[in-house]
Amino acid sequence: MTIVAFQGEHGAYSEEALIQHFGEDVTTLPCHAFEHLFEAIESGKADFAVLPVENSTAGSINKSFDLLLEHDVKVHGEILLRVRHCLLTMPGQGKTIREVRSHPQALAQCEAYLNRNHYTAVPWYDTAGSAKDLAATPAEGVAVIASKLSAKQYGLEIVEEGVEDLRHNYTRFFVIGTGDAEVQGPSKTSLVFAIPNTAGSLLQALNEFANRRINLTKIESRPRRNRPWQYVFYLDFDGHWQDPAAREALIQLLSRAAFVKLLGSYPAAATTITEETTAQTESLQI
């Protein structure tokens, strides 16, 4: 049985993502913090872990990328989860809502909905945690914003689905583990590198990919935690590192960079947008 670690309580969006990727038969292991995901893999308690790295509206999760640099794990896959927030209450309490609890980011993503309904937003440590706590200690007039999985996990009633303000709300997760992922289907590669602090050094490094017509899908700088005012660059590109053009680009990058760490080549997630999201995006453009 495959064991996959995730951060948060049962019912968290990370758990929803891993079920989307691995299926219903997977064994899930909740962890308190991102650091514990890496510990679970390195200790052998889990075969894989799902690590959120980016949100389509909020941007990158910096701590995740810092931990990927610090630990000896590899990316085995990516998951794109459509985050669909639900308003949950104790059964039969849907018409008495005054207060809504959830993680601050979830509350922010539902701000217009909360204001429109005159609900008081109350920050909680976790989305699934707010559902777990409400089920354990019922309170009149209190609802939570969490996943549909949380409602099932804790026996709560779904008052309304899709209460987020922006429908085009996806979170990208890495599936991390030991060793290298199998080569299968269209691939994506992630790496981190540092370059000398000289004029044109970044341009020269990136040209190694451009000159070979390799499509870069993401590049982002982060401070080096052990060297103030120096930076590392996280980069994703389409293709596998073993592809001839990619291999040549990486060899040339190694000659220009202070260091290069290959985070992994892995099957790329499908990027299909749902019909609902497309229709609503088009309506905003009219």
Image: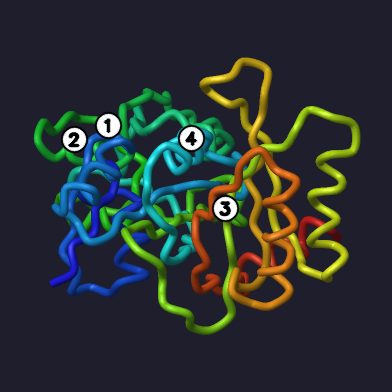
Tag 1–tag 2 contact (CB < 8 Å): yes
For residue 21, which quarter of the picture? bottom left
Mark 4 and mark 1: span between their CA atoms?
37 Å
- On residue 66, which mark appears? 4
In three-dimensional space, the C-alpha distance between marks 3 and 4, rounded to whole angstroms, equals 24 Å
Q: Which residue is drawn at 62% across and 74% down?
A: 275
| First along the sequence among labels 2 and 3 | 2
Instruction: Say which label, 4 or 1, has the lower sequence index.
Output: 4
> What amino acid is labelled 2 in the image?
Leu
Out of 151 and 103, give the one closest to the viewer: 103
Q: Which of marks 3 and 4 is nearer the N terminus?
A: 4
Residue denoted by label 2: 134
Number of the label disc, if any, that sits on residue 169: 3
Kind of residue at disc 1: Val
Where residue 154 appears, as percent x and y from the top left, is: 15, 49
| Residue 180 left/right relative to 186 | left
Displayed quadrant of residue 279: bottom right
Q: Do the residues labelled 4 and 1 touch (CB within 8 Å)?
A: no
First-in-chain label (1 vs 2): 2
Farthest left residue in view? 136
Find disc 1 in the rendering and name its residue: 142
Q: Where is residue 112 in the image (x, y as percent from the top left)?
A: 58, 36
Q: Which of marks 4 and 1 is in front?
A: 4
**Farthest residue toward the top?**
228
Q: Nearer the viewer, mark 1 or mark 3?
A: 3
- How dense is the environment of label 2, judged by Cα within 10 Å: few (below 14), some, or many (20 and up)? many
Q: Is mark 2 on a helix, strand or loop?
A: helix
- Marks 2 and 3, how far apart in space? 25 Å
Q: Which amino acid does label 3 sit on?
A: Asn
Q: For the residues carrying marks 2 and 4, which lies nearer the camera in this image?
A: 4
